Amino acid sequence: MNKSKHLLFLSFFISLAFITHAQQNGAMLRSIWENEANDDIKRYKALDEFYELTNQQFPDSALNALNYHLGMATAKMNSREMFSALKRRGNIMRLQQNYPEAISSYTDAELIAKKLGDSLLIADICGNIGNVCMYLKDYITATRRFSTALKIYQRFGNVEGETRMLTNLGSVFLTIHNYDLSLDYYTRVLASMNKRKINDRSTGIVFMNIGWAYYEQKKFELACDHYLKALALLESEKNMFFVADCYLDLALVYYELKDITKALEYVRKGKELNKTLGENKGNYLQRL
């Protein structure tokens, strides 16, 4: 067996092993949260674990569990669990580009946060609503939402939240083509992450954004370098929605670098992964 075939079979069996593991764990967790004899804390914990297990690779399964989560929390009048289920539902809807449903879930979660008087929950959902506004090209509302969340995080000394909102504001400038200012924001964000030794999905997303800024500035080698750093992190974290985006952006970068073989390879990977995730990203081949 040649090397490429060996790697193909290895990849297949690793994927099969992961799916089998997820199915077994999922069935066990479901038996816990559906058993009303268990105490509520144990049931909510099982729902939390199932969400973490499935939200990126199996979003439809995650949504089904979230519907149960919300129904259970509503019946028991547990506002914080209702908030959690609604926010997570909005997250998946946003990633699947179902923006009306995402806004609806986030808005319901925001009302609960305000009734609870919990400023950090309000900041959290403000940031998420801002993300949807970005996708809808409502940059004024997005900036307002991100700025509101930023002020709350700064007031509470929440460095993680502050860094996240600085990242989002950097994305606003990236989107309106102020690449120098966006790179300034992202450089500050990376410095904060390095200081706190953070090297996870959020770092990968920042690398992606920096890569896009360099791509737009036609600095394709720098763009490629940052996208590959992003891809390594996002794949290790199994954040497949962002991996799909990274594949397709890398296709564009490699095209500009005149490496058509790699460009087409990443187009194929991106389209196959998007199909698996149920997204409709459009035909990137038309952009090449």
Image (cartoon, grey):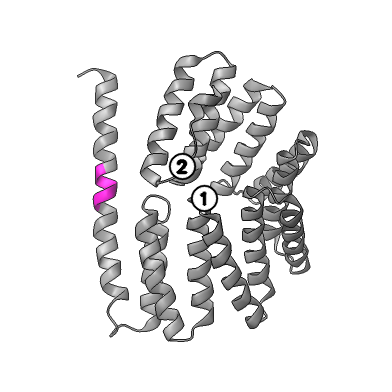
Q: Position of residue 26 (x, y in %)?
A: 29, 62
Q: Residue at x 63, y 21 (%)?
A: 221
Look at the numbered disc 2 and give the secondary structure of its residue: loop
- Name the residue type under label 1: Gln
Q: Which residue is painted at 41% across and 77% down in the image?
A: 71
Q: Main secondary structure of the magenta part?
A: helix
Residue 280 badge: 2
Q: Earlier in the sequence, mark 1 or mark 2?
A: 1
Would you say residue 73 is visible in this rendering? Answer: yes
The disc at residue 97 is: 1
Q: How busy is the neighbourhood of tag 2: few (under 14 within 10 Å), some, or many (20 plus)?
A: few
Q: Are marks 1 and 2 in contact (CB under 8 Å)?
A: yes
Rendered location of residue 162, percent (x, y): 72, 58
**Residue lying at the far left of the rendered structure:** 1
* Left or right side of 65 for 285: right
The residue at the point 45 percent across, 21 percent down is 264
Residue 253, compared with residue 202, is above or below; it is above
Quadrant of the rendered image containing residue 1 = top left
Please determine whether, in this image, residue 67 is positioned above or below residue 9.
below
Magenta-tinted stretch: 16-20
Q: From where the camera sits, is residue 191 visible?
A: no
Would you place residue 12 above or below residue 96 in this image? above
Where residue 132 appears, as percent x and y from the top left, is 61, 54
Q: Position of residue 62 (x, y in %)?
A: 38, 60
- Indicate yes or no whether the magenta region holds residue 17: yes
Q: CA distance from mark 1 to mark 2?
A: 8 Å
Relative to residue 154, is residue 120 drawn left or right?
Answer: left
Note whether 194 is above or below 132 in the view shown. Answer: above
* Camera-nearest residue between 162 and 34: 34
**Residue 65 included in the magenta stretch of the image:** no
Q: Going by the image, does 137 lie left or right of 205?
A: right
